[in-house]
Image (spheres, coloured by chain):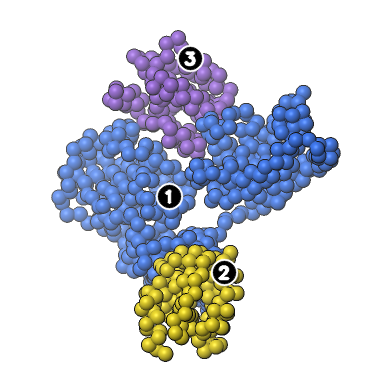
Amino acid sequence: MKKEYHKYKKLGLIHLSGRLDTVEAGDLKESLPFYLNNSKRLLLDLGQVSYMDSSGLGALLSGLKKAIAKDGDIRLANVRPKVKMTLEITGADRLFKSYPNVAGGLAAWSSEL
Amino acid sequence: MTITKIITNDIAVITLQGRFDSAAADQFRKAVQHDFLPAHYVIEMEGVNYIDSGGLGCLVSLLRQAQKRSGTVKIARIPSKIFYAFELTRMNRIFDMYDDTGMAVNSFTATN
Amino acid sequence: MKALFHIQQSDTPELKDFFAETHPWMVKIANKPSLEYLLDFAILSGCTEVRLVMDEPDLALRNYFGGGERWGIKISYASCSENDSLDQLLTKNTRFCDSEPLLILTGLFFIHYHKDHNYQDWQRLSASGMMLHCSTGTLLYGKTGNDLRYLSDMRKEVDFTLSPIRSLRDVYDLTMQVLTFEQEHYVLPGYGPEKNILIGRNVEIGRQVELHPPLIIADDAILLGKTVVGPNAAIGKGAIIDRGTTISNAVVTDHTYLGKGLTLSKKMVNGGRLFSAPDNDWLNLNDDLFVRIIEPQGASYFLRSAINRLAALLLLVFLLPAWILFKIATCFTEKKNHTTTCFKNKGGNLFSYTYDLPVRESVAGRFCRALSLNKVQLLVKVLSGTISLVGNRPVPSSPENLLLIQTFDHYHPGAFGYSEAQQLTPGSLEEETSERFFAANRKIANDIRTLLNILIKNLRTFV
């Protein structure tokens, strides 16, 4: 799993790529709190993520919990159908706000602040 | 096992009857060896009531021999029980099967 | 009248990956195999004999349809080669086709009909040698087989329509259509306590489960507490739906486990695979918490595995002292140390074992083969339940072998292989045929004979 972090004013943007599975989830779960210390609002670009299982989703949910505790949020952009399916069956699609693309997501979220 | 052979032109029609098992394998191998070897074989199996891996192996070997002479082996009138053994070993993929012996013989002339 | 149904694997490329283990004719529409609808239609039309012609035989299909006794007709089977023309089909099945009027269904499709309507007349009134198309198949009718060689389109209005089955979306849509609008049109499996609810035998329904029609639940399914099923849900045979899960506008196929607290909407799951109808895309999720396949294991499985382990343990007790002595004696000689990875089952799972004994050409190597010491590593695998004591020669994992394995219905690797006893060339067609034959005809007596044969044969190599 590759991660690339950028900061846009009050928002942090992380491009993720690869598979969010048992092998990679631990790493993401550990690193999300660090990014959240830098910016409590994180937009995750999942455009290059091809697969997510229960452990990947677990990592995202634990990140979301920490973000909300800091009065921040984690949102998703560019979710591909294969990942969307995992979000849908678990009902996690109702917990994460998501945007069709990164630019639109950054603009829409910034205008809320 | 009873084996009957009729050879016309370069097609041999071999009619089998009885148990086609490892014990009958030698008999079959001898029966298909001639001084003059036909290109094609039609094996009529209506009277076969049992086949095992030895019998199936014979047919595969015969096919390989025939293919060396650019011939082939076709199966005719196979009983459903024997056909099942063909399916289990996926031999249905390597043999063309006909429910009529005459049609199997004709199919050689039709394609040549 | 007779009917000949014909299908080729190449007809259904899109279904193949998602329904990997399932023959396209066994893919279920509302818990009933797609073939059974065609069969029912043929029977309504007056057919008394049906021949199923396919290029890929299927064990599950054979077991389900058998000789047709359940339907009161005669079902026979025949094979075809890939890309056989209609003419070749008729030639290969001459005897079957020539005596009576003939209905031919070729390709994979669905027939919409109504079980209470009369289908005895449509063929009699229409001209011989006519056909009805849809994009994935054709229905043909002729008063003699020969009439089918000269065909014209069906002109008469008939009381049925064909609809194509090409994609996963088609399977999903048809299931929804049958459930919602056509439940009364077909004989569907299960009894109906209420309108539009059909429930199979031996279904377990937990506390506070909500059932919203229309829905259909197959035999042996288990719904744990607080699940919500329907509207528009089909639950397959032996499926397990864990607590609090909601299923609507969705299909759960046979032997699928669906995890706790999930929401399955507009989707179809098969084993670990998940299809989303709106996205028209699917994913192999295979996650123990979400969706996975349930491996069927009967009571005989446990008995057989216990016998296997016990026998392996006995052999090990005999071999182990020799093996240890041998290890000490040969600790400085040249050794071949390599790990082999082989297929564990038809599903493509793997197991590996390490071979670290002297090279087989050396005297020490021959000695160790004679005593079957080379089997010690494999016997340990038998003890752990990974493989059988006697079974197929383990097939090494490789892309080509994966194709072989996927079509190998009873593949079960063993420490001692069937064809090992027969001295057939590894990798030859004869060996493959023999392996398939023995695997399909497993008998304890056979296994014991094979085991003794190999042990004795090994001993002889040294003498």
Q: Callout 3 environment at 10 Å: few (<14), some (14 to 19), or many (20+)?
A: few
Task: Between label 2 and label 3, give the one nearer the viewer.
Answer: 2
Looking at the image, residue B37 sits to the left or right of residue C242; the answer is left
Q: Residue C236's x, y, as percent?
A: 47, 62
Is there one chain holding both mark 1 and mark 2? no
3D distance between C-alphas at marks 3 and 1: 41 Å
Nearer to the camera, C162 or C259: C259
3D distance between C-alphas at marks 2 and 3: 67 Å
Q: Check if mark 2's residue and mark 3's residue have beta carbons within 8 Å.
A: no
Q: Residue C115's x, y, as percent?
A: 31, 58
Type of amino acid under label 3:
Gln
Letter of the chain shown purple in the rendering: B
Nearer to the camera, C217 or A83: A83
Chain A: give its colour: yellow
User: Which residue is disc 1 drawn over?
Assistant: C23
| Up-down relation of residue B111 to residue A72 (above or below) | above
Secondary structure beneath disc 3? Answer: loop
| Up-down relation of residue C298 to residue A65 (above or below) | above
Query: Which chain's residue wears label 3?
Result: B
Query: Which of the 4 image quarters holds residue C192?
Result: bottom left
Type of amino acid under label 1:
His
3D distance between C-alphas at marks 1 and 2: 36 Å
Query: Which chain's residue wears label 2?
Result: A
User: Which residue is disc 2 drawn over?
Assistant: A25
Chain C: give its colour: blue
Q: Residue at x 50, y 60 (%)?
A: C271
Secondary structure beneath disc 2? Answer: helix
Secondary structure beneath disc 1? Answer: loop
